[in-house]
Amino acid sequence: MRLGVGRLISSWGRIYLAITSGFCFDEALGRIYVIPRARRVLFAGIVASVTAAVGISTLNVASASPDPASDDSLSFTAETFAYPNAAKILKERGIILRKGDGHIILADCSASRDIEVLSTRTDEPNPDRGRFCFKVTGTGKAGYLALEIPKVHHLSTGDFAIHASLTADGKTQEVSVPKYDDASVGEGTKVPGSPTVLVELRVAG
């Protein structure tokens, strides 16, 4: 195999020399021949075609090789829309963030309050004691987040209107909150209702 590769390299070297110099040496007869310009052009075209074919084959092999740094893991996250570090957030903040499109993210209330959620549950390991704030990213025309915050009694907005889904007693309640407004739900209404669980937030523009 090594001998074959050596001969192949040697042959290509001779062809290249013949094309560039215009001369060809016949080892068997010990003679030097002049190669006409037309043939040199023809040989040059053949060499270019073969080189291109070899390059394409090499590229295809490289593309087919598995890449440990490929986007497989990212594609998996994109397909499931799972919220990153959800287990850590549950442990540290006591709420469940299931999945979303990345345009509604949990934030520090001192930094962003595009969406503010208040809960009567104060026993969770949340530094804001029943208050959860979310930041809206992107254009603000769309956003989705599936989550679970129990005992929610108040929702408020900043620059973006929202649509919220809450559950209580096995039923789902839909609430729309305009920009710079708020809404009382569940135990926060004038006639206190059953404890509600916030299960979905959507940006409504």
Image (cartoon, rainbow, N blue to C red):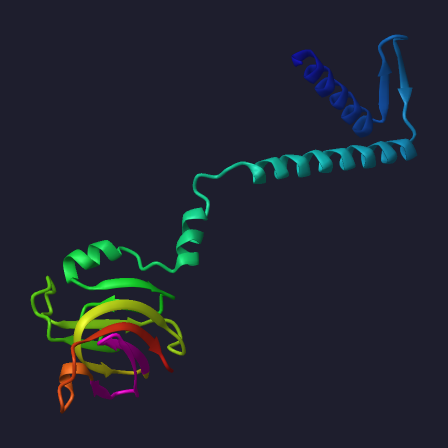
The x, y position of residue 32, in whole percent, is: 88, 16
Q: Nearer the viewer, residue 54 or 171?
A: 171
Q: Is residue 182 above or below residue 138?
A: below
Q: Residue at x 85, y 27 (%)?
A: 22
Q: Considering the image in quadrants, where does the C terminus appear? A: bottom left
The x, y position of residue 74, in whole percent, is: 41, 52
Q: Residue furthest bottom?
A: 190
Whether residue 120 is visible to the viewer of this picture, yes or no, is yes
Q: Residue furthest left?
A: 123
Drawn side of residue 9 relative to residue 126, left or right: right
The x, y position of residue 36, in whole percent, is: 92, 29
Q: Is residue 54 above or below residue 152?
A: above
Q: Residue 60: within the magenta?
A: no
Whether residue 111 is visible to the viewer of this picture, yes or no, is no
Q: Considering the image in quadrants, where does the N terminus appear? A: top right
Q: Residue at x 11, y 75 (%)?
A: 120
Q: Is residue 15 above or below residue 59?
A: above
Q: Nearer the viewer, residue 93 or 34?
A: 93
Q: Residue furthest front?
A: 170
Q: Nearer the viewer, residue 55 or 156?
A: 156
Dominant secondary-structure state across the stretch colored magenta? strand
Residue stretch in magenta: 162-184
Drawn side of residue 197 relative to residue 141, left or right: left
